[in-house]
Amino acid sequence: MNSDAGSTAPDLTTGGTGPHSDQPVAQAGAPLGEGQAAMIMIHGRNAGPHDILGLYRALDRQGFTYLAPAARNNAWYPNSFMAERESNQPGISSGLSMISALVDDVVQAGVPRERIMLLGFSQGACLTSEFAYRHPARYGGVIAYSGGLIGPPETRWEILGSVEGTPVFLGCSDRDPHIPEDRVHDTARIFEAMGARVTERIYPEMGHLVNDDEIAFTQELMDRVLSG
């Protein structure tokens, strides 16, 4: 497999079911199966795997396989993450199925789940959060840049299981045009109830982007995974 940032390995595609299955997976870092750890990176709306994989050089950690799957037509679901869930189907279910299949592929390649990190930005951060919530387990870390759990404002989340101390990072602006601050707080509360070690950082007037502090914190978590 090609280890250059932004490369697409022809022998790995997304699994699962629905519209996001059988899409290519861009890769960087160590070849899958040879790395000590893996990071699955979920891109945002109107973007693609190479956009999120652009963080590979900023994160600057050897020993990781970086995997960035593609959403069909560059969007995981059509509407706001706070719209009625049915209005975003089958996109949400297909995206969750795709992440599940990719995690299974990584585990089968020899990387244990506790050395797999899940990272997403914007729409990808919402899908990443939703996956970790609906598939509770001990992961190396869950990183949500400008995102939160999916569902309309009146959603009540049940506690579906334990994430067994998984570090969860939630970073967002206090006036993000797409992500209400209250939803970030709700997401933190649910993951804490599921046994996560949550770090929540709200950045004044940041806008909809990833900042240096978020990258630095992610690097700290990556170092813990590599040394664990």
Image (tube, rainbow, N blue to C red):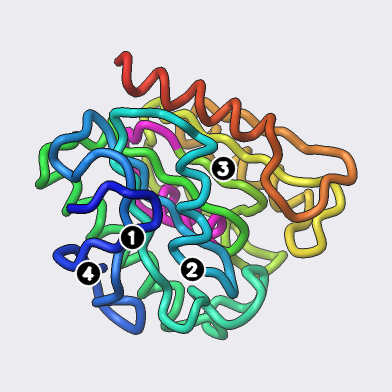
Disc 2 element: loop
Left or right: 137, with 45 as reference point: left
- Secondary structure category for the residue under label 1: strand
Question: In the image, which disc is placed on residue 35?
Answer: none
Pointer 4: what residue? Answer: 15
148 vs 89: above or below: above
For the point 57% across and 30% down, the residue is 198
Separation of residues labelled 4 and 1 (CA atoms): 14 Å
Structural distance between the alpha carbons of marks 1 and 2: 9 Å
User: Which residue is depicted at the point 46% across and 57% down?
Assistant: 42
Q: Which residue is mark 1?
A: 26
Between discs 3 and 4, the one toward the N terminus: 4
Q: Which residues are magenta?
A: 124-141
Q: Measured from the top left, where is residue 138 in percent x and y?
A: 32, 33
Cα gap from disc 3 to disc 4, whole angstroms: 28 Å
Mark-to-mark CA distance, 1 and 3: 31 Å
Sequence-wise, which precedes: disc 1 or disc 2? 1
Residue holding disc 3 = 190
Residue kind at label 3, given as amino acid type: Ile
- Residue 38 in the image, given as x and y percentages of width and height: 30, 39
- Circles 1 and 3, Cβ within 8 Å, touching? The answer is no
